[in-house]
Image (cartoon, rainbow, N blue to C red):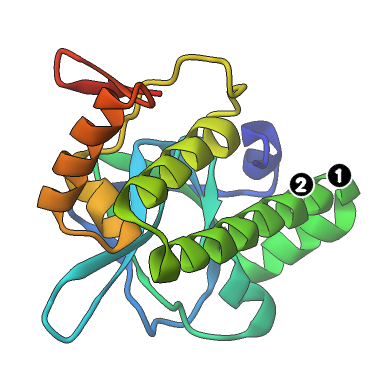
Amino acid sequence: MIGEDVLLAFDARIISLKKGETLFYEGDTARYFYQVKVGEIKMNNFNDEGKEFIQSIFTAGNSFGEPPLFINKPYPANAVAITDTQVYALAKEVFFELLLQNPQVHLSITENLAQRLYFKSVMASEISSQEPEHRILKLIDYFKENVNRLKPSDKYKVELTRQQIADLTGLRVETVIRSIKALEKKGLLIIEDRKVYR
């Protein structure tokens, strides 16, 4: 995360998006560094049958879409607002200048990218070989510990919808619902007022 004061000092502009609005499409040329100010962004793709696969979800303070900036490749996914959202946008050249002038920010961006690569690696393994319950717990624990920075012993309210969990794990929503109920029976999840806790 880059501090708002630093972003503004480098003349970042704010882009407002309505729920469901697309910031960029898969295949577009990467020209900006983006960071969520308020709201939520999902990176997604669709298969040939039109089924959505969510690559990741980004909330306030999270940056997204950086890898193509570094390797001059097009975006591998769409960026869509889940809620009314505002994002900071910083032109690629200015972003690189910011990194050169701020080694600590550069390290923070590198750590963030490494964290996301780790998540992709773990989830790729989970999706290809693990049972639905295991996949769901792995995803929830990732959001708990890495996105929300909570300790394993902390109680965590899962903000993802059942549909988002399905789209992030490659499962059907019906399977997610059944698996969450089974995980509750095993004492691995808590359901209170239709909300899931871990």
Q: Name the side, left or right, on which 16 lies relative to 173.
A: right
Return the x and y of residue 80 as percentages of the image width and height.
28, 58
User: Mark 2 sits on what residue?
Assistant: 108
Query: Which image quadrant: the C terminus?
Result: top left
Return the x and y of residue 103 as percentages of the image width and height.
89, 50
Dot 2 lies on which element?
A: helix
Point 53% across, 73% down: residue: 31
Q: What's the amino acid at mark 2?
A: Ser
Return the x and y of residue 49 as percentages of the image width and height.
11, 82
Q: Is residue 65 visible?
A: yes
Against 26, residue 5 (above or below) is above
Pick whichever, 176 or 188, lies toward us: 188
Point 43% across, 46% down: residue: 139
Point 86% across, 60% down: residue: 100
Mark 1 crowdedness (10 Å alpha carbons): few <14, some 14-19, many ≥20: few
Against 16, residue 119 (above or below) is below
User: Mark 1 sits on what residue?
Assistant: 104
Against 39, residue 72 (above or below) is below
Q: Is residue 58 visible?
A: no
Query: Which image quadrant: the N terminus?
Result: top right
Q: Which mark is residue 159?
A: none
Mark 2 crowdedness (10 Å alpha carbons): few <14, some 14-19, many ≥20: some
Between marks 1 and 2, how big is the CA–CA gap?
Answer: 6 Å
Corner quadrant of residue 118:
bottom right
Mark 1 vs 2: CB contact within 8 A: yes
Point 25% across, 48% down: residue: 164
Q: What's the amino acid at mark 1?
A: Gln
How many numbered marks are there? 2
